[in-house]
Image (spheres, rainbow, N blue to C red):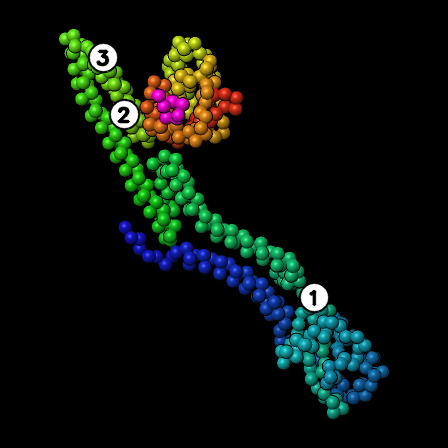
């Protein structure tokens, strides 16, 4: 099935996400000086303009004020609405005539006013400067500037203009936060896909990607749909294969039963020979193999049934009794340590069959003793079956022994190694519980099989 093209794709999301994120940060930082300028700088009010005009008229009418001695006397503070106002007289060369030292704020304001090209006022941190008012006195051009001690509360975001390093740090942090949220938005469905893929790889054929991910209108949603379609096909194919094996194994029982019936009739007629004994032995072996194949298929096909919560010790009681009896017959000891309080959801028949196969295998190869213990951990219930036998020499065989019809080199003889289906049935039963099974050699001697079963 060909998926339709959708403009809401990952490339567009990545492009728009990171572009908008960086553009937003740049715009916020770039707007701060403009906001400050609009807040601090505006046209000069009429009242302040009249104050400068009044001082200019006074100088124009009395040019002798321009004398340096009288300028010093004239430069004293004047009253403006109950506040002291300072007036600065500037010549055509930009030199302040009535003050020996002009402030940095005044020089900065003169540049701002020159750029504005008209009389303005500008609010500095603790003072208000306004002007210029241009006039002529004695045939020469002059300008007047005024200054008022005035403190206005500034907007909180102007704090960032005065602290550039802090502003840069916050911008980097904010950018990282926005990019992190965007990455989380893209990574969440990918994590869901990974969990479903891991579950499918571990044998959970019912694993599917959640619908929230499937309904996304981008490549991730299309990938989730394709994954679910693939999982459906794999599940159908595996189940069909298991049903085929089960059907074939079941059908093989009919001619096998006829064969054994014919052998029984031959014995009654006195036609027993070494050849007929061999045929009977092989028929028994074939019947047992068919039974194992049917059990393996049954465990895998019924893996999605509801699991009741049962006590582990009670579920395994009959299996443990049989194993203890078998161990005594072989002059070996079986140590059992399973807490009766352990309760978990499980399939009784598959789990019993798995533990039975593992215990029989351990008793067969143990030298003197076998132990089985179960403990509850945070991850689930851990069951360990340990023997003191020879173990498995080849490390590669430790993972391969759970494959159907696989037997390690030490157990290839049929009398001791079976058909390689017992451990495969055990693994299928554990996987039906969404658990794990691991084989490893003991540091001292023997083999240890560990089963991890989830608590839910």
Is residue 7 shown to the viewer in this render?
yes
Q: Are marks 1 and 2 in contact (CB under 8 Å)?
A: no
Q: What element does badge 2 sit on?
A: helix
* Few, some or many residues within 10 Å of mark 3 (<14, 14–19, 20+): few
Q: What element does badge 3 sit on?
A: helix
Place of residue 445 in the rendered image (x, y in percent of width and height, measured from the top left): 50, 20
For residue 405, side relative to residue 56 (left or right): left
Q: Residue at x 62, y 78 (%)?
A: 116
Q: Which of label 1 and label 3 is nearer to you?
A: 3
Q: Residue at x 78, y 81 (%)?
A: 97
Q: Which mark is residue 274?
A: 3
Picture quarter containing residue 107? Answer: bottom right
- Per the image, the residue denoted by label 2 is 294
Region rendered in magenta: 407-413
| Residue 411 magenta-highlighted | yes
Q: Is residue 315 above or below residue 48?
A: above
| Image quarter of the C terminus | top left
- Per the image, the residue denoted by label 1 is 125
Q: Is residue 389 above or below residue 57?
A: above
Q: Could you tell me how many numbered marks the image carries?
A: 3
* Few, some or many residues within 10 Å of mark 1 (<14, 14–19, 20+): some
Q: Residue at x 21, y 14 (%)?
A: 276
> Counting residues from the N terminus, which is met first, the one under dot 1 or under dot 3?
1
Q: Residue at x 65, y 59 (%)?
A: 165
């Amino acid at each position: 099935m060909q998926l339709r093209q959708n403009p809401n794709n990952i490339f567009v999301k990545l492009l728009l996400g990171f572009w908008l994120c960086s553009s937003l940060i740049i715009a916020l930082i770039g707007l701060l000086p403009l906001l400050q300028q609009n807040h601090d700088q505006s046209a000069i009010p009429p009242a302040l303009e009249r104050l400068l005009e009044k001082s200019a008229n006074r100088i124009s009418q009395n040019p002798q004020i321009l004398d340096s001695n009288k300028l010093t006397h004239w430069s004293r503070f004047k009253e403006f609405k109950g506040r002291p106002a300072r007036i600065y007289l500037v010549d055509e060369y930009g030199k302040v005539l009535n003050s020996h030292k002009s402030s940095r704020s005044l020089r900065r304001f003169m540049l701002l006013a020159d750029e504005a090209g008209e009389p303005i006022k500008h609010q500095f941190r603790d003072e208000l400067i306004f002007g210029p008012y241009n006039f002529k006195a004695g045939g020469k051009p002059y300008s007047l500037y005024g200054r008022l001690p005035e403190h206005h509360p500034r907007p909180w975001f102007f704090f960032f203009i005065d602290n550039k390093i802090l502003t840069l740090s916050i911008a980097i942090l904010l950018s990282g936060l926005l990019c992190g949220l965007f990455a989380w938005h893209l990574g969440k469905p990918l994590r869901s896909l990974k969990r479903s893929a891991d579950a499918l790889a571990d044998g959970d054929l019912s694993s599917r990607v959640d619908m929230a991910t499937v309904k996304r209108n981008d490549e991730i949603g299309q990938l989730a749909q394709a994954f679910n379609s693939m999982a459906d096909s794999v599940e159908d194919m595996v189940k069909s294969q298991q049903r085929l094996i089960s059907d074939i194994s079941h059908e093989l029982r009919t001619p096998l039963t006829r064969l054994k019936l014919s052998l029984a009739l031959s014995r009654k007629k006195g036609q027993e020979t070494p050849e007929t004994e061999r045929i009977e032995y092989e028929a028994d072996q074939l019947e047992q193999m068919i039974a194992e194949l049917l059990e393996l298929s049954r465990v895998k096909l019924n893996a999605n049934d509801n699991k009741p919560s049962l006590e582990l010790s009670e579920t395994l009681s009959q299996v443990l009794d049989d194993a203890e009896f078998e161990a005594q017959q072989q002059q070996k000891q079986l140590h059992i340590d399973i807490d009766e309080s352990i309760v978990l959801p499980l399939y009784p028949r598959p789990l019993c069959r798995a533990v039975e196969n593992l215990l029989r295998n351990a008793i067969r190869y143990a030298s003197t003793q076998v132990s089985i213990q179960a403990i509850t951990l945070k991850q689930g219930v851990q069951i360990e079956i340990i023997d003191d036998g020879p173990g498995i020499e080849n490390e590669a065989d430790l993972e391969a022994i759970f494959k159907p019809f696989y037997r390690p080199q030490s157990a290839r003889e049929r009398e001791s190694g079976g058909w390689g289906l017992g451990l495969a049935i055990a693994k299928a039963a554990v996987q039906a519980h969404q658990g794990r099974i691991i084989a490893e050699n003991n540091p001292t001697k023997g083999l240890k099989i560990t089963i991890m079963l989830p608590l839910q």
